[in-house]
Every structure is written in structure tokens, then in C-alpha cells.
Image (cartoon, rainbow, N blue to C red):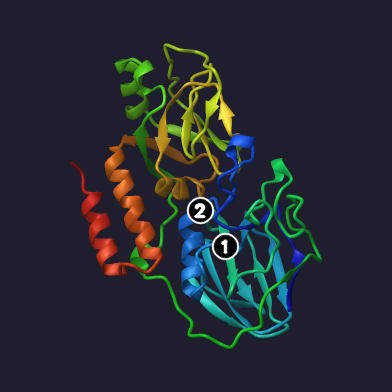
Amino acid sequence: MTLRILTPGPLSLIQDLGRHGHQHIGVSPGGPMDEHAFLWANRLLGNPLNAPQIEIAIGQFSCQFHADTTIALTGADMNATLNGQTVTVWHSLRIRAGDQLSLNGARRGIRTYLAVKDGFKVTDILGSCATVMRDSLGGAGGQGDKLAAQDLLRYNVTSPIPTRQVPLQFIPEYGQDIILSVIPGYQYDRFDKAERERFFSSEYTVTPQMDRMGYRLSGAAIQCQTSSLISEGIALGAIQIPADGQPIILMRDRQTIGGYPKIGCVTARDLSTLAQCQPGATVRFIEKELYQAEAERVIEQHFFQGYIGKKHAEKILNKNNRPG
């Protein structure tokens, strides 16, 4: 059976965890901008972690379900309603044939994730259905298109499952004054000490030039001893410093190579926080050791894969995040 898109909003995309292993041929990975919210939506439903979902940016989205299922909504609170009745994000909900879901404007954050039990049934291209519009790959039709009115998305008819909610301690506040952890790397040593100190002590502002490719910031200009490089591979979260000295944080649909100096990478965990920031949000950076970032990443992955419980994960992550 199918879900019908009634109003798609400015940008609604099919996403899974991304198209990995193809950057060497110029293919961007794509994937969910807020991976934390995406993973929780699938966990609420007992889905495989890679099960395809709809990533809804800004809001103004509505759809109708043509068969019974269970859904989950996570991410930004967009004043969602089901048949006109208010529903809460970070919960799963039972759906009956004919039900209509609507998302309006975001109260906080800018992206909401809609998952169905067993995931949407979408054809993979290069091992993934993630929509990357710039590469014309993925999505409902495989051509990288955003969702449009009257698009139909297939899903399995499923028996009711218990509804669940995300524990409060795992629900982000989506504040607009954030701190991002940075792993020093790339050309870090080519920025002199004064420039590095300026970078980590300054406050930056998210500009309107922000999308799935990257977030451009404005603030204290940072200069590198090397102004241009031979193009090299670009990691998720890489912080480019172009000639004007204003940082650009590269996101899921980033180009695969680039020649600007880079001072390091924002951790994958903190990119989910950045992905929910609106223009005008303020950003500060703190330095994080590679081993600590790796440990936190492994703990988070083990939690979502069910190897450790939420209390154990919370205890370890809180310990790792203590100052000093």
C-alpha cells in the first residue's frame, strides 16, 4: 500500500543512511542531516537502522496513508497534527487507512523525520536510496528529485505494534546557541597559534547560505599560511577556510574533493545539532581529541544497534563529556 504526498513543503527528501563507498568517483554520500533523529525514528519502530524515511525541512508538509501502519516522528517540532489532532514528536503513532498527517512551521529546529514500520519501499541506486539532488541520484524515482504533490511511496501493511516514546534525556533541545566539537586535522598545523586561538575563542553566526552541502558562518576571519592546495578528499564535517577567512562546515551532500585549507572536522554527533540550526544561530567551537570522538561514536552506534542499554550509554557519554 502507499502514502500519498498532498503538500511536499519546500524540501522533503527520501533518505537512508547514505551512499557510501563511491566518493572516489565523485558521488556524494547524502543521508540524514540529523542522524540522531533519523536513528531514533527507526529505533522507535524496531526497524533496521538504515530503513528509508522522509526528511522534511521547514514544514508545510502533508500526506495521507492508504493502509494501516505505525509511524514515528522525530526531530523538529513542526506542530504536527493527525486528522486535525495535535501529535507529539519523538513518539510513535498508530495509523489507520485514510489518516492524514500535517506538519506546519517549525517551533525549534528545521528538520523532522517521518518513518513507517519496515521503512518505505524505494529502489536503491548504488546501494542506497538517499536523495542527492546535485548528483541526480536516489529518491522516489531514482533521479534525485525532491518529493512532489501526488507522489506515492509504498510501505508494508503491518499489524499494530506498541507505541513508544524517546526517553527525555535523549531528546535534543535544538537551541540556537550551540557548541561544536572539532577534531583538529587536515591543515591544522598550517594555521599559526594566534589563528587557532582566534578560531576557538570566537563566536560565529550561521548565515542564510546553509543547505545540505554546507553551512557558511560569519565572524572572526581566520587566515592560513597556505591559501590554496591540490584538491583532496573531503570528510563529513570538514571545516574549510576560504580566502575570506569565514568557515564553511561541509555536510551530507558536500562535494567529494576541495582545495581550500581545512582546520579540522566537526564530530558526526555534533553535526546533527548544527543541522537543526536556523540562520542567525550562534556557534562556538571546542577542541576534541580523536580518541574521545571515536569512543563516543562507537558507544552511540552500539546503543542504536542494541548492544548496550540506554542507561549504560547515557552514563558513559555523560562521563566522556565532562569538562576537563
| Structural crowding at the residue carrying mark 2, measured as other residues with C-alpha within 10 Å and reported as few (<14), some (14–19) or many (≥20) | many
* Of 111 and 213, the residue lying toward us: 213
Q: Position of residue 32 (x, y in %)?
A: 55, 53
Is 306 on the left-hand or right-hand side of 107?
A: left
> Extreme bottom residue here?
159
Q: Secondary structure at mark 2?
A: loop
> Disc 1 marks which residue?
113
Give the amino acid type for the residue marked by disc 1 in the picture. Tyr
Does 149 sit above or below residue 229?
below
Labels 1 and 2 touching (C-beta < 8 A): yes
> Extreme right residue here?
150
> Disc 2 marks which residue?
34
Q: Quadrant of the C terminus?
A: top left
Q: Which of the two labelled residues, at mark 1 and mark 2, occupies the earlier sequence position?
A: 2
Between the C-alphas of marks 1 and 2, the distance is 9 Å
Q: Position of residue 78 (x, y in %)?
A: 58, 62
> Which residue: 57% across, 29% down?
257
Give the amino acid type for the residue marked by disc 2 in the picture. Asp
| Structural crowding at the residue carrying mark 1, measured as other residues with C-alpha within 10 Å and reported as few (<14), some (14–19) or many (≥20) | many
Q: Quadrant of the N terminus?
A: bottom right
Does 286 sit above or below residue 87?
above
> Which residue: 58% across, 34% down?
256
Q: Secondary structure at mark 1?
A: strand
Residue 309, can we see it? yes
